[in-house]
Image: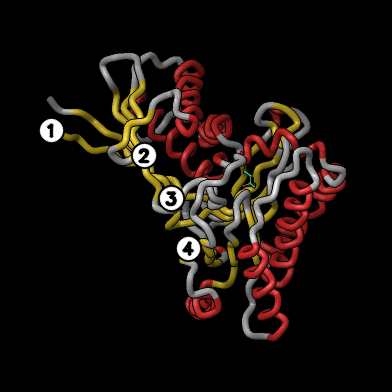
Amino acid sequence: MTAKRYIAKVPSNIALIKYWGKREKQWPANDSLSMTLTSSQTVTIASRLKSSSFEVFVGKHQLFPTDPFAKKIFSHLKFLATNLDFADGLRIETSNTFPASCGIASSASGMGALTLAAIAAWEDQCESPLSLQKLAHLARMGSGSACRSLLGGFVAWNAGDHPSLQSIEQVAKAEHWPLADLIVVTSAKAKSTSSSAGHETANTSPLFAIRTAGIHERMRIAREAIAARDLSTLGPLMETDALDMHAVMMTSKPALNYFTEATVAVLQWIRDQRKAGTLEAYFTVDAGPNPHILCRLEDAQKISALIHEAFPHFEILNDQVGTGPTIDSEVTA
Ligand code: PMV
């Protein structure tokens, strides 16, 4: 008997202007803007089953709905099946090319890949009749930032004035501006508080309203800086936005802190080197301890070597802006 498998490869994305906090279920408190990556990706393979159940594997390891890590995967599959009216069960095999749950946006690539692979298997075709907007909105229901991973290059997620007015928009293609993202893996340990839990308490911070009020202007400057390929404007803006999001986290109730001594040391080192004129690179940090260092692609090798020299114990993932997801099928015997 032959079986058809659908393989979705969805890259992670790094937010330059961060989404933090929700107005209501999967409706973000603020607009956000990210760069889709290339090498850090989730590969998810889906095939239809005769039964109506879901079987989920990470590598060879089978996950069950009671497993806290797997809960989100099973509930997203159920959500997709109900929303799109598909009755068949699926076998899902998923893996990441990078460490998960430590601030490299594995939920973005993971939920993006799950959405694309599952829908392709149900529809039995790679090219979905659903629009990219619709697919992105479905992915968003699994993890907000996943909607941005469905497009390549630089991507905005606009919150709109109503949940139904949210939109996902490619601000610039990957080819427009070849930027590198050097991810310094200070720790590959999974974080103890998920970003989903963090979004829930964001509005308890006295800094939350100040942050969200300023995002509109930040988005405007970021869009202009991307259009002009202006790193010396985008970089400091991106650093401020990341630190401002972490300040919200640290002043929320309960307080949330993803920074470690190593995170702070890398951020300080980047600023010191920049001041000394050694390099032009800027940092951002997602919900985890691992700094992302953005620089021009032509400078990436040199800067990666300098980071390695200063922090020889940390692995560096050399990534860059990418063109977005791919989906293929194969027939197995
Ligand atoms: O998509 P979530 O629920 O994992 O939240 C993502 C939050 C950040 O990564 C910290 C910021 C962002 O915009 O990606």
Q: Verify CB contact (< 8 Å) between mark 1 and mark 4.
A: no
Of circles 2 and 1, the one toward us is: 2
Task: Identify the residue under disc 1.
Answer: 333
Task: Identify the residue under disc 4.
Answer: 319
Residue 191, image x, y percentages:
56, 46
Left or right: 44 with respect to 332? right
Q: Earlier in the sequence, mark 1 or mark 3?
A: 3
Q: Between 252 and 8, which is closer to the camera in this rendering?
A: 252
Question: Disc number at residue 41?
Answer: 3
Q: Between 333 and 95, which is closer to the camera in this rendering?
A: 95
Label 1 packing within 10 angstroms: few (<14), some (14-19), many (20+) = few
Left or right: 159 with respect to 208? left
Label 4 packing within 10 angstroms: few (<14), some (14-19), many (20+) = many
Q: Secondary structure at mark 2?
A: strand
3D distance between C-alphas at marks 4 and 2: 21 Å
The amino acid at mark 3 is: Gln
Q: How is the image coloured?
A: secondary structure
Q: Verify CB contact (< 8 Å) between mark 4 and mark 3.
A: no
The amino acid at mark 4 is: Asp
Q: Earlier in the sequence, mark 2 or mark 3?
A: 3
Q: Earlier in the sequence, mark 4 or mark 3?
A: 3
Residue at left offset 29%, top offset 28%: 47
3D distance between C-alphas at marks 4 and 3: 10 Å
The amino acid at mark 1 is: Ala
The correct choice, above or below, for 14 with respect to 233 in the image is above
The answer to whether residue 326 shows anywhere in this view is: no
The answer to whether residue 231 shows anywhere in this view is: yes
The amino acid at mark 2 is: Thr
Task: Identify the residue under disc 2.
Answer: 94
3D distance between C-alphas at marks 2 and 1: 20 Å
Q: Number of labelled discs? A: 4
Label 2 packing within 10 angstroms: few (<14), some (14-19), many (20+) = many
